[in-house]
Image (cartoon, rainbow, N blue to C red):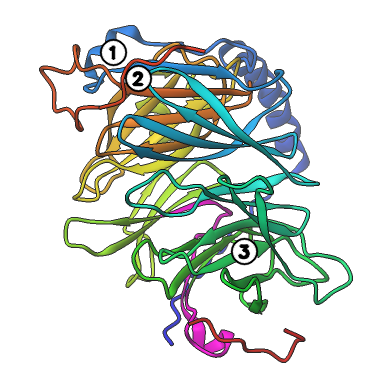
Amino acid sequence: MTLHFITDTDASDSSSDDEEISDRSSLNEEDSLEEDEVIDINEQPVFDSSKEINYKIKYKQTFEELIGSNDVYVLKLDAHKIGQTLRVATALSNFTCNIYDIDAECKSITASLEHEKKIVDVKFGSSNTLLSSIVYTGSEDGTIKLWDLRIKEKCVSVFKDDTDVELKPLSCFDVSCDGRFLVAGTEVFKDDAFLLFWDIRTTNLLGGYWDTHQEDITQVKFHPTEDKTVISGSTDGIINLFDVTQTTEQDALQLSFNTNSSVANLRWFKNKNDDSVISCVTHTEDVQLWHTTDSSPYSIIPRDTISSSMNVKPDLFSQIINCHQTNENGNIMLLVGNDNSKGEHLQSLDIINDGPELSPRSLFKNNKQIVRCSWYDYKYGIMITGGESGILNVWVPNDEENNSVANPGKCMLKELPKVSLKNHSSKPY
């Protein structure tokens, strides 16, 4: 087992006498007034339209659906594309998950799935030939449910840790690439934050880890091709990498990365050398890129760099929604927006030469909401977004406008109407 930690740098203190504090206080009050005149949190962000020519891939909106009232958010989503049809699962803030079938002719709601508390994520089962009918939803109610959309009684399995009287509140989950195992992270429960593992075939709880995170676990991700490898991230700022075939938590822990921040989002990528890369979005809206063999991020893209690259003024409202791979070489783009007004200014930025340099990629015009989640298929360039106004959008490359630029792939979706895990433990698993 190899452990790599980054140590925090010591903060420096400063002091001054009472007169200097008084003088500085007066100056700061004046500066504050001047700053308030320049930066107003109620000011409407404005896009510099002269920079639009720099966005090389043009998009159009082909589907728009208001799922519910304005107080219903789209928190998470997942999708499958088979042929000219999209199946989209949306986890909503009212504890339900709607499944949409969208094609060139119409859209329909296949099912509405329910939990007793907030749904923390939704994922389809994998399928290479047909639209998947298997959906997983995980919730703060302490359960992950497996739904089979082909049958009347859709919920066929429930995964939970009932070793305590009270179920542990789940905060995230993932499914292994071979579809055999589930992993979930929890909020702090009785002084521990847990990683829990289940065998999908039996719903048996296989075991848990509880010593490697000190605060709420915010992300767990199985490797996309290695079913034994899992990463987890937490508000404690640590990213842990596990080999879950090992018998004990201590042996399973292979690497620890200290982000010196709080982990909001983790993704796996493959670069052009087929090396594994981890992207981390922090709660301070910075992006870190890590090789799994390094003790520090090989690239850090700070929020002010992202804000200044959006060509929106004022630029203090930047919001990172997700990181997405754009081609087989592992190039990465950031989907970014802003959290002021209705969050209309939605766009993507390419990371250049591993960062921190960014370049404009696409604008998503006529967006009407602060976007909270996204799904992207780089083979066809399809982007799906959901957000705080309860709107589901499908965006596709505008082939007519992209004739003169590098197209990520001709979209086959027609114009749509807008409408071996081993148990270890001294605890009772």
**Segment colored magenta:** 242-267
In the picture shown, does residue 294 fall above or below 259?
Answer: below
Q: Are marks 2 and 1 in contact (CB under 8 Å)?
A: yes
Provide residue 232's location: percent of width, then percent of height.
53, 65
Q: Amino acid at mark 3?
A: Ala
**Label 3: how many residues lie within 10 Å, few (<14), some (14-19) or many (20+)?**
many
Q: Which residue shows up at 54% across the image and 25% down it?
A: 108
Residue 263 appears in the rendering: yes
Q: In front: 371, or 82?
A: 82
Answer left or right for 327 relative to 229.
left
Question: In x, y percent, where is residue 104?
Answer: 37, 20
**What is the number of the mark on residue 184?**
3
> For the residues carrying marks 2 and 3, which lies nearer the camera in this image?
3
Of circles 2 and 1, the one toward us is 2
Q: Looking at this rendering, what residue extends furthest in the front direction?
A: 152
From the viewer's perspective, is residue 372 above or below residue 219? above
Identity of the residue drawn at 31% across and 19% down: 414
When asked about the image quadrant of residue 50, the answer is top left
Residue found 73% across the figure and 29% down from its top: 25
Q: Secondary structure at mark 1?
A: helix
Q: Quadrant of the N terminus?
A: bottom left
Characterize the local packing of mark 2: few (<14), some (14-19) or many (20 or more) Cα atoms within 10 angstroms.
many
Calculate the distance from the C-alpha at mark 2 to the C-alpha at mark 3: 35 Å
Q: Which residue is mark 1?
A: 52
Q: Nearer the viewer, residue 272 or 87?
A: 87
Give the residue furthest to the top. 49
- Judging by the rendered image, the residue that carries numbered circle 2 is 363
